[in-house]
Amino acid sequence: MQNAWARKALVFSLLVVGAAATVVATAPWPGAMPMFSKGIGAAFTSAAPDAATVTLTPQDTYLNLDSVNYSTAPLLATYTWPDARVANTVVMKFDLSSLPAGAAIQEATLHLALVESDGVADTYAVGAHKITGKTPVINQATGLNASTSTPWTPSTCCTNNTPLAQADISTPYDTQMVDTAPGFKVWTITRLVQEWAADPASNRGMLINSDTAKPRDRYRFFASMENPTTTLRPFLRVTYLAGDVAPPTVAISSPGSGATISGNVTVLATASDNVGVAGVRLTVDGKAIGNELSTSPYGLTLDTTALADGVHTFSAIARDAAGNTNTAAGVSATVLNGILVLAPQDTYLNLDTTAHSTEALLGTYTWPDNKPANAILMKFDLSAVPKGVFIKEATLNLALVESDSVADTYAIRAQKVVGMNPDIAKATGASADGTKSWTANPCCSNNVPLAQADVSTPYDTPLIAIGTGWKTWTLTSMA
């Protein structure tokens, strides 16, 4: 059962054939700022020793009961007309990209300067909402459209069914009862800005809404980014704690670089972080070894007999609680156990002239009764086997991923290809290489040869049950 290797490397072909069905596989207030004419601004100040504050300026406009864009207007209008209906509403967009990665938002306040009101001696409820349904373009938005090509969601909220974005907003994050005294009014929208920071794609902007509990012609006008008095222009003030952006350091301490290893070995990494290491995952050739390790020492025992003989690269990935990660420089060590793990070129043959070498499954199938309809074709390159060695054991391992579910077994034979030298990328049920036909035989439907006359007797024929997982053929004498 043991064979001496000849001086030159060998490449052999293997055919796996099934005996039952299965699949195997490894009005109003004019005004306007072009959308990017000023840009969205940011200014930083210090707050508490461990916090910072940034002041952001918006792109802004207001919506009216018409198809006009008011982004160049010096005012931002909220207006009730007729009774208990919105006639104007404010749309704003803030760019949060100046906030550092991982920043924890502590407070966010919107500041609007009231410059004109209806003069009635009571308050006017102005709510701050997140825009959720559409993404407005500020220098294109109107009472009808979020942008030139995108209408607001239809709504019966307002006169003439002008939508005014009322169906594209959240419930209010804050509602201020705005009196008639000129000056800055403040909305606390911390939760809204936290949501934007956590999910930047959700930052479609915000809407400042009119009071729908008031009679007609009640209003509040605020200064816009186009207001000639720059000190009255709107801003968002955000206070945040800087996030942890420093990744851990990590290195492999065992095995040593250039070491020769066999049997069970300890794979060990060292790791540290400015705050704390949350976990370390050891890898070999980019694949995880066991589970992530949460406490030091970061090590475990690896059975190297699961690896093919040769050079392998050991590394580790460390992470901290903030999600920062770092990967250790690879350390190469040579495994020497007398074991090689070889991956094949593979395909399966079907009752057609199509090559299936790029498909994810390898199929064995019986159709019609007692005739093969698929067969698996594989080639292994044995040039990595050292010269002059004796083969002690050779096993083929295939992972069953799907079957016909009939509760019995299915005989799958492993046979050597002897009559042809197939080209895996081109082989079909009719041809070994896209040109040369398999030897003719009446094995299969429509006399498709399916390589059945070009194979040896079986080297192994396990009976495959329907349970998924690895199935093994012993092919020592073939090797």
Image: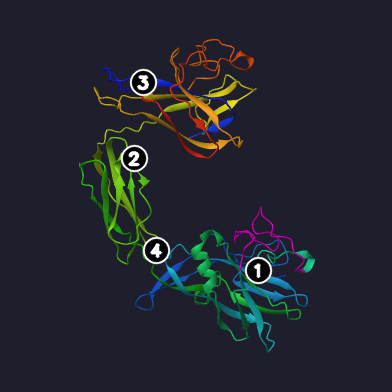
Using the image as rendered, state which of residue 53 and residue 457 is in the foreground. 457
Secondary element at image label 2: helix
Residue 105 appears at what percent x and percent y?
46, 71
Res. 222 visible in picture: yes
Mark 1: amino acid:
Pro
Q: How many labels does the image show?
A: 4
Q: Quadrant of the C terminus?
A: top left
> Which residue is rendered at x = 34% and y = 40% of the image?
306
Which marked residue is nearer to the observer: mark 1 or mark 4? 4
Say which residue label 3 marks: 11
Which marked residue is nearer to the observer: mark 2 or mark 3? 2
Res. 37 visible in picture: no
Marks 4 and 2, how far apart in space? 35 Å
Few, some or many C-alpha atoms within 10 Å of disc 2 (few <14, some 14-19, many ≥20)?
few
Few, some or many C-alpha atoms within 10 Å of disc 4 (few <14, some 14-19, many ≥20)?
some
Question: Which picture quadrant has residue 409?
Answer: top right
Residue 205 appears at what percent x and percent y?
57, 64
Say which residue label 2 marks: 306
In the rendered structure, which disc, 2 or 1, sits on the residue that comes first in sequence? Answer: 1
> Which residue is rendered at x = 53% and y = 40% of the image?
467
Say which residue label 4 marks: 322
Reply yes or no: does residue 104 show up in magenta: no
Mark 3: amino acid:
Val
